[in-house]
């Protein structure tokens, strides 16, 4: 290829689209992205050159710009990141990482037909909930179970199916907002129920419920205060007493548990967290998330009395809120792990990450800090420090887990401005596999509790662009 441009930038004219497409360097780009896409990218590059947003390089440089554009466009929008925020179940970062057993099960039903709604024994139409129901019942003691899109959907469906145009009795201390878009009073209104508030913000007694229950009552509901705690002069009605009262008065009693914990946390050295099994001994129905402490995929589970679940199943909203085969496959495979408690910790990523010892994480931080410092040279000085992780997703808001982190601080004695840390944070987010940490107290901290792929993390850091020159 003859070189095309004379040295003076002002008089040079960019090559034509056709000429660039015919260049030898275009062939591999065409093979990967196609001629149509490359033509569009070249046009965009040439326009940027004409408008002075891009320098006029030689032909290979122009083609490299076009290829860079195509590569950026081809990168999936939804992709893996390193969650080193210290929040294990981070709603914005996808909550629970799935066990490999679940991934295999999902892949198996994705590429071919399955018995999603087909009873293989009878050879006739079956019920999609059957794939998870028996396991949920076995693990929780429930008589029946339904799976829907998430726990918000589970609550909506329970309310609409059991208390349409009726009153739902809830304590004023539990009229909570969960994650900004799920407010108990709003969900209730949308479900077509009338909220009957009882008690006060800090104290609600059994007699408050007793006085409120009447002919208009459709449901009594308790909401687990997932993301906050009220301390001091407080009282709430005992759930067992409330369950007895509801049975006497003949109204169903539901507990919205939020996090779906099935195991004794104390046995794993974790702060106590109520289990679905306990809640079901007191309530007729329990609703909980699939991707919080349960450690499975996004879904909402409703477990409890058979007659109530039959009413819920007949509700037309069930169809609108149902989940697809991938969700059942992932949920079933994850629930199966609970049948083998001895190996649960090793196989269920959520539990494995939550139960990591601070000393082990500290040793990992010591192990990685040297290579991390190399990659961060000029950007930050790296120190290994203790820190506190959180469970996240509203679970156990006040309980925290001791951990260890790489604390990144601006190097040298220059201004320790938050501006520099923000730029570092942005550079880490711009990596091919973004690294997400937490900025605070003059440092950007990478909590290693949730880091399992050490090699991938070091490779990601090694791709960090050199730091901008500081003023
Ligand atoms: C998290 C939570 C919800 C919402 O669950 P999603 O699965 O996010 O829809 C509802 N209620 C409580 C108590 C929760 O903790």
Image (cartoon, rainbow, N blue to C red):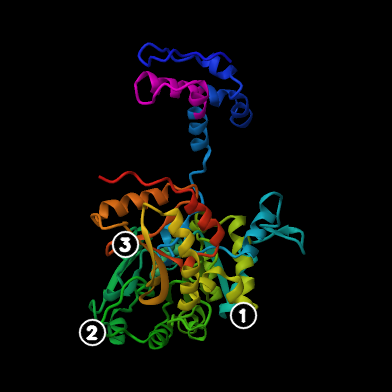
Residue name at image x 50 percent, y 59 percent: 149
Q: Pick whichever, 203 or 159, lies toward us.
A: 203
The residue under label 3 is 443
Tag shown at residue 278: none
Main SS of residues in magenta: helix
Nearest to viewer (mark 3 / mark 1) = 3
Residue name at image x 48 percent, y 66 percent: 450
Nearest to viewer (mark 2 / mark 1) = 1
The numbered mark, 2 or 1, whose residue comes first in the sequence reads 2
The numbered mark, 2 or 3, whose residue comes first in the sequence reads 2
The quarter of the image holding the N terminus is: top right
User: x, y (%) of residue 160?
Assistant: 42, 63
Residue 171 falls in image quadrant: bottom left
- Dot 2 alpha-carbon crowd within 10 angstroms: few under 14, some 14 to 19, many 20 or more: few
Residue 143 falls in image quadrant: bottom right
User: x, y (%) of residue 97?
Assistant: 53, 63
Residue name at image x 47 percent, y 78 percent: 359
Asked which secondary structure carries label 2, the reply is: loop
Q: Is residue 158 above or below residue 143?
A: above
Tag shown at residue 341: 1
- Dot 1 alpha-carbon crowd within 10 angstroms: few under 14, some 14 to 19, many 20 or more: few
- Dot 3 alpha-carbon crowd within 10 angstroms: few under 14, some 14 to 19, many 20 or more: many
The range drawn in magenta is 40-64
């Amino acid at each position: 290829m003859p070189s095309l441009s004379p040295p003076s930038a002002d008089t040079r004219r960019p090559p034509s689209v056709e000429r660039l497409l015919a260049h030898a360097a275009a062939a591999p780009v065409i093979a990967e992205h196609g001629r149509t896409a490359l033509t569009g990218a070249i046009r965009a590059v040439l326009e940027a050159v004409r408008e002075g947003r891009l320098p006029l390089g030689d032909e290979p440089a122009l083609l490299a710009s076009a290829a860079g554009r195509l590569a950026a466009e081809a990168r999936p929008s939804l992709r893996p990141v390193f969650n080193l925020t210290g929040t294990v179940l981070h709603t914005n970062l996808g909550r629970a990482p799935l066990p490999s057993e679940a991934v295999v099960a999902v892949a198996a039903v994705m590429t071919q037909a399955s018995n999603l709604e087909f009873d293989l024994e009878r050879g006739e139409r079956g019920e999609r909930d059957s794939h998870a129901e028996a396991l949920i019942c076995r693990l929780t003691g429930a008589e029946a179970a339904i799976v829907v899109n998430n726990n918000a959907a589970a609550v909506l469906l329970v309310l609409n199916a059991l208390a349409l145009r009726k009153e739902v009795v809830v304590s004023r201390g539990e009229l909570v907002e969960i994650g900004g878009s799920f407010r108990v009073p709003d969900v209730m209104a949308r479900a077509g129920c009338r909220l009957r508030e009882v008690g006060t913000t800090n104290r609600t007694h059994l007699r408050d419920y007793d006085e409120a229950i009447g002919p208009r009552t459709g449901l009594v509901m308790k909401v687990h205060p997932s993301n906050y705690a009220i301390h001091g002069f407080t009282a709430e009605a005992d759930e067992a007493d409330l369950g007895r009262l509801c049975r006497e008065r003949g109204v169903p009693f539901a507990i919205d548990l939020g996090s779906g914990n099935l195991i004794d946390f104390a046995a794993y050295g974790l702060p106590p967290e109520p289990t679905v099994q306990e809640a079901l001994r007191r309530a007729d129905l329990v609703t909980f998330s699939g991707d919080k402490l349960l450690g499975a995929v996004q879904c909402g589970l409703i477990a409890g009395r058979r007659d109530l679940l039959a009413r819920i199943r007949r509700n037309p909203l069930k169809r609108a809120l149902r989940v697809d085969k991938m969700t059942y496959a992932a949920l079933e495979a994850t629930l199966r792990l609970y049948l083998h408690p001895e190996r649960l910790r090793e196989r269920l990523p959520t539990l494995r990450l939550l139960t990591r010892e601070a000393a082990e994480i500290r040793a990992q931080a010591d192990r990685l800090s040297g290579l991390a410092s190399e990659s961060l040279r000029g950007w930050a000085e790296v120190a290994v420090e203790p820190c506190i992780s959180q469970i996240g997703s509203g679970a156990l808001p006040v309980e925290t887990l001791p951990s260890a982190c790489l604390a990144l601080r601006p190097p040298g004695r220059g201004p320790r401005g938050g501006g520099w840390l923000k730029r570092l944070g942005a550079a880490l987010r711009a990596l091919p596999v973004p690294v997400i940490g937490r900025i605070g107290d003059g440092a950007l901290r990478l909590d290693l509790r949730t880091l399992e792929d050490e090699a991938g993390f070091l490779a990601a850091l090694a791709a960090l662009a050199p730091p901008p020159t500081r003023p």
